[in-house]
Every structure is written in C-alpha cells, then in structure tokens.
Amino acid sequence: MLHTVNKSPYETNSLSSCLRLARKGHTILLFENGIYGALKGTCFENVVTDALNKYQICVLMPDIEARGMRVDNVITGIKTVDYAEFVDLVASNSTVQAWL
Amino acid sequence: MKFAILVNEGPYQHQASDSAYQFTKAALKKGHEIFRVFFYHDGVNNGTRLTVPPQDDRHVVNRWSELSKENNLDLVVCIAAAQRRGLLDENEAKRHGKNANNIAEGFRISGLGQLIEAGVQSDRLVVFGD
Amino acid sequence: MEEEGVVKKFLYVNRKAPYGSIYALESLEVVLIGAAFEQDVSMVFIDDGVYQLKKDQQTSVSSGIGMKDFSKTYRALEGYDVEKLYVDKKSMEERGLSVDELVVPVTILDDAQMGELMEQQDVVLSF
C-alpha cells in the first residue's frame, strides 16, 4: 500500500497520523510541503529515521529542489523519486491513500 | 494500467492541480491510460476559461485543456461543486437563467457518479488535494 | 447505475472538522451519490474528522453561523446501506470524546485495526 503525505509536519499531523496508522512494509511518499518531513537536522529526523525500519519512505525530488533543498539534505535511507517513479509507485501498490 | 485522478483544489492557491498535472503527464508518458480526471471541491475552478494568469506564469487551466486535446483526456468537473462556485457550461447557464458560461475547452460538467465510476473502472485512483 | 456487477471496497477517509471548510459536507455528498453504485463502502473518521460526528451541532438557529447542520445526514446513511462507520480510537481519546457523544453508532478501531482496514481497500477517497 502507498501513502502520500503532502503536508509539512510543522503544519498538520498528516505525517504523524500516517506513520501511526500505516502498516509495516507500506510505502510512504512525501511530496509538496510533505518533503519538509524528509530533511536532516530537523526535530522530525529521529522519528522519520525510526520509521524507516517499518516503512519504505520516498520523497519527490522536484519538490525538494523547488524548496531550495538538495539530495544531501534528505535523511539517509529515504529514496528520492521523480514524477515517473511516483507513477511507478502508484502502479506497484494496489491501494493509494492520500493524507491530505 | 488505468488511472483515475481526483483534484480537490483550485489552481494557484494550492499545488494540488500542478502535482496532478505533472503526475498525469508522467503517467501518459509511461504509456498508462488516464480513465478520467475528476475535479471536486475548489478543484472545479481548474475548469474556468476566464482565468488570466500573468504572462510569465504557467496557465494551469490551458495546460489541462491542451493535455486533454493531445491525449483525449476526460476532464470532468463536479456539477454540484461547480454550481456552488459559479462555474457553468452553456446548458447549465441556460437552465439557471444566467447570461454567461465559463467552462474551459476540454472540460465537461457532470455528476459525482462519474467519480465513483472512475474508481470502479480504474486500476488506481490517486487523490491530489490540500 | 450498477457497473456490470463490479463491487470494489471503497473507503472514505474523513480527517477534517466540519464547517471550518467544506470538505466534510462535500465528502458526505460523494458518499450519498456513491451509494447508488452498490459498492462495499466504509467510512473512517480520523483526527479532526471525528468532530464531524459530534452530537448537538447547532448551526441554523438565529444566533448561529448560518449554515445547514448536516450532521443529521450521518444518521440517514443507514438507509443508503452505508453502515460501516469507523472511528480512530486515539483521535477520539485525544479530543476527550466518547462514543455516546456521537450522532451515530460507530466501531472504534485501534492503530493496527485501522491500518488493516485501509490495506484491504481498493479505492481510498480522501477529502
């Protein structure tokens, strides 16, 4: 199952609810302002790093780059994807849930 | 694979329509079929032809219209959500006694059943919103 | 309206409070229209979405906010064969709410049960 999170974790609890309710082995894609949850050196880094033991976490690079960040800013273990790979993620998971 | 796309936000205010557009374009490029793009909530505002963005900005509405033309995309605006927000096609304008309509090329107005049908008929439904 | 007998599991995810925005009301409209398609429908209420089900909403009284109280519609869902309503346990507890404060009978799910329900779906509509 694929979960998408498009909200900054500083703004809403979309990411925390998603991390709480998704099941082991699920994939989570952070995009739009959701990418702020994928960055190193933040108060969410530990939580997200721990979550990597349970989930595959991906982040959409165009949204990272648009916000002045680079791949170096992304927490180690998070997979960077482009729109084409976003499409692949949707195709390879039978259900997609958006955490708006 | 057959995809359905739901866009819940209008143009410019949120990134939802941009993300949905980039996703749809990428899916088409990969050879997937887009069964339908359904516009709901403020997403109906993606379908007004009266949109005039600054020249150096992307034209969200025209971009959808063009993508629809090139790929024979079915762009459906929810009728109930559209009426609330002042988006009408020729028939609806006539039916409600309004002297103008503002639906953009490539979009059509229809009922919520089209969203459910898209969910039933497609292999995946992807939601873009706020 | 039936789609050649195809029955999919549809999940409506409600995570937003009523009235402050239109999401709750318009999502309910999808559920009502969708009922005609005779799919296997479930609704979940998570985070502020739990507030949609709070009893005693008063909106259309003269001193009120001047909107339609649509919370009554949740009670009509049974008539549309939409009977699987689930509330996230943690969201309800965080908000100091209990089941007897909700307009309709619901099933309370813990984290693991909610995750399992989501995983079983074919189509997840979030608003």
Image: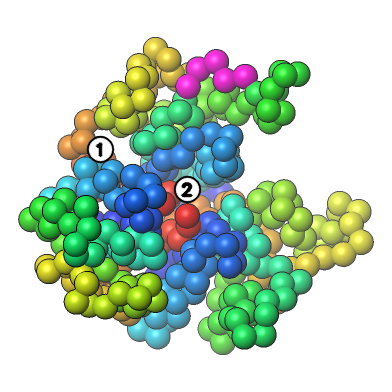
* Disc 2: host chain: C
Q: Is residue A73 above or below residue C81?
A: below
Q: Nearer the viewer, residue B113 or B19?
A: B19
Give the residue type that dot 2 points to: Phe
Give the residue type that dot 1 points to: Met
Q: Residue at x 57, y 71 (%)?
A: B74
Q: Which residue is mark 1?
A: C114
Q: Is residue A43 left or right of residue B36?
A: left
Q: Quadrant of residue A87?
A: bottom left
Q: Nearer the viewer, residue C81 or C45?
A: C45
**Residue C7 seen from this side:** no
- Mark 2 and mark 1 lie on one chain; the one further toward the N terminus is 1
Residue C82 is one of the magenta-drawn residues: no
Q: Which residue is mark 2?
A: C127
Counting from the top left corner in percent of width and height, residue C51 is at 45, 28
Q: Quadrant of residue C101?
A: top left
* Residue located farthest toward the left when viewing the structure as drawn: A53
Q: Residue at x 27, y 59 (%)?
A: A37
Q: Most prominent secondary structure in the magenta stretch?
A: loop
Q: Residue at x 36, y 56 (%)?
A: A8
Q: Which residues are magenta?
A: C54-58
Counting from the top left corner in percent of width and height, residue A6 is at 38, 59
The local secondary structure at tag 2 comes to: loop
Counting from the top left corner in percent of width and height, residue B55 is at 67, 85
Residue C56 is one of the magenta-drawn residues: yes
Q: Is residue C72 above or below residue A1?
A: above
Q: Is residue B20 left or right of residue A40?
A: right
Are callouts 2 and 1 both on one chain? yes
The residue carrying pointer 2 sits among few (fewer than 14), some (14 to 19) or many (20 or more) residues within 10 Å by Cα, namely many
